[in-house]
Image (cartoon, coloured by chain):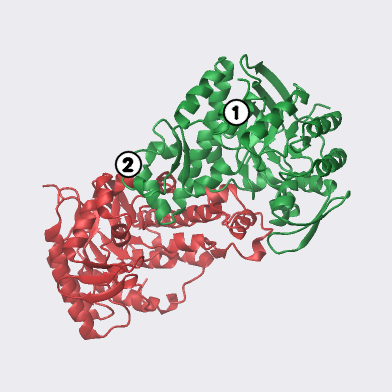
Chain colours: A red, B green
Amino acid sequence: MEPVIKYELIKECSQTKARLGKIYTPHGVIETPIFMPVGTRATVKAMTPEELKDIGSQIILGNTYHLYLRPGHDLIAEAGGLHKFMNWDKPILTDSGGFQVFSLGGLRKITEEGVEFKSHIDGSKHFITPEKSIEIQNALGSDIMMAFDECVPYPKDWHYVKESLERTTRWAKRCKDANKNPDRQAVFGIIQGGMYKDLREESARQIIDLDFPGYAVGGLSVGEPGDLLLEVLDHTMPFLPKDKPRYFMGAGSPDYLIELVLRGIDMADCVLPTRIARNGTALTTRGKVVVRNAKYSRDFTALDNECDCYTCKNYSKAYIRHLFNVDEILGARLTTIHNLHFLLKLMENIREAIKEDRLLEFRREFYDKYGYPNYIDKLKGF
Amino acid sequence: MEPVIKYELIKECSQTKARLGKIYTPHGVIETPIFMPVGTRATVKAMTPEELKDIGSQIILGNTYHLYLRPGHDLIAEAGGLHKFMNWDKPILTDSGGFQVFSLGGLRKITEEGVEFKSHIDGSKHFITPEKSIEIQNALGSDIMMAFDECVPYPKDWHYVKESLERTTRWAKRCKDANKNPDRQAVFGIIQGGMYKDLREESARQIIDLDFPGYAVGGLSVGEPGDLLLEVLDHTMPFLPKDKPRYFMGAGSPDYLIELVLRGIDMADCVLPTRIARNGTALTTRGKVVVRNAKYSRDFTALDNECDCYTCKNYSKAYIRHLFNVDEILGARLTTIHNLHFLLKLMENIREAIKEDRLLEFRREFYDKYGYPNYIDKLKGF
């Protein structure tokens, strides 16, 4: 049987650990490194699928926890799966629901069997096991399913993290075994281990031993400082096999995306660009622009004068500010288009830079205009 | 000087008083009869200009009262006018602000000079005169400006209505004289007179005497029963000249649009289709569909199986219901596209039916599926 998910390494960066690659999925090919817009509840907020494609989205996320609660995975299965339900024919990755169970759901109890939690909507009690998570993801029909794991918050003591990662490994095995559609849906493993280097290594060895077609680095970007995040990541990456895609869960600021790619990450996702868009903040080549600010009320220039997205080609800051000021839906639409376009274009530029052996130059030029992240002077290497 | 707005009567209906025509404006030609989507605050809610064009919008409305308060007409003038500010290059009609001053604003006092009112946003005091209304509309740069009038509520006594309509006539004259851009913006007159036939006639004669390039029938659809509306309209229409476009202010239900066209109306506008869309109600060939209803939760068919709009081609009731259920912006977008498409398509079908001398057949077939309005059996004629 052909593998459902295949990774092709096209080129290794001559300056960093970045990689240019392709991921083959049942719904098409993804060029990596890539940012994945998040479609929590069967829609990337404020966007149509056509708009997502227009700005270069190659793959989007769906959230198992949210879709399980509303409208229910059985309903989506009846609709013909998530692709058909939401009119998206390119690849979909679904998370396992683990992160939301632990962060949104009123967590009741973690046992070897699974997790008992309360719905954040109506307080109803639910029990999710690794098998249940995969059952839901099988019903959704995503190309890439994530293993059900415990994302340990920061900070947490060594003993807790060790116990948790070992359970996460046992759950990962159960997830793999539970997959009812191995011909068209694949499970990715998730490496945990908190901020402890020995535990990161242990988790990496255990998860990789189970042989998944792709691996996520989980449990980072959970509140720790940026330099610690990168230090733990730097320590973890060498354990990952070169012939599999590497996914960093929960990064969406331009600086994180750049730093992650430099360290060999191929895929990342985050609600940040769409969430701040709906609050009236735009990501631009000169840093963030809070377009709600009064100083833009008579600024008739584009959000970003170097941007060629639909929003920047047609609308001024003054107009967008007005839309936010009077609570018009079009405001959120225009900033969302811009922010997602900005990150997808950033990733395209990064791929180009890897190809042309000038990733470090690209990075410096980017930060010179955008501003350097506050953790950047602490960085070693590069 | 060429007139700014020119009406061409192409064909009179052989069965009714309906007319097929064209209105020439500085921003293009409008085929009539037409429905005009309302863009209250420099945006037709939830839509982009491109989406509006895709579904056949030929002209949209802007609201003088709202734009005067936020972001301010001076700001829009600085942006290059409303067309440029909101990225709409087809015709725009602006109302005079009169209706909103009387309905939304905390009305303080009507004098011969103008109207004092309080902003519905911050309670600030404002004074609008006919000259001020035109000054604002000149700043917005609309193709068609409306004369500042008093829209008398229903019911109201004869003496009040008579006094009011006579003042409205004097205001209409002042509006015409106040127009600073007679080379590119035209003022339409508005006929008032409440539900009194003698006063309708008086208002019509006075306003038409001022010789505007187009006339609106105002002060109807203000709470009176449907049969009374049509009775007053039937009485008023014969006074209107054939060589000028006729605009009915505030009608957006399919049955009203049909009945108005039958009586010789060329243009109509209303927030109804967009407002009910955002509440989860769709206009369809089989009547209204309240897609929020639980009975649609597993209905995987389109809102309207005879519709070929973007929404109906790609999404199911179950999906749209889910979007409303979890408060996703895409829900309002999809129903808005559908409802506006529905009305614009209805007007296109009406134009086709006039052309082919089968308007009454079209009307009967439409009502047979959509349902007859409750006032229809009281109708005389047709």
Residue A23 appears left or right of A46 = left
- Relative to A181, is A288 above or below? below
- The quadrant of the picture occupied by the C terminus of chain A is bottom left
Relative to B332, say whether A122 is above or below.
Answer: below
Q: Is residue A277 left or right of residue B242?
A: left
Mark 2, Cα crowd under 10 Å, few <14 / some 14-19 / many 20+, is some
- Whether residue B228 is situated above or below residue B329 in the rendered picture: above
Residue shown at the point (67%, 42%) measured from the top left: B222
Q: Nearer the viewer, residue B167 or A92?
A: B167
> Does residue B32 appear in this view?
no
* Circles 2, 1 touching at the beta carbon (< 8 Å): no
Q: Chain of mark 2?
A: B
> Which circle marks residue B378 in the picture?
1
| Measured Cα–Cα span from mark 2 to mark 1 | 39 Å
What residue sits 66% from the left and 17% below the top?
B12
Q: Which mark is residue B185?
A: none
Left or right of B37, for residue A111 = left
Residue that carries the numbered disc 2 in the rendered image: B300
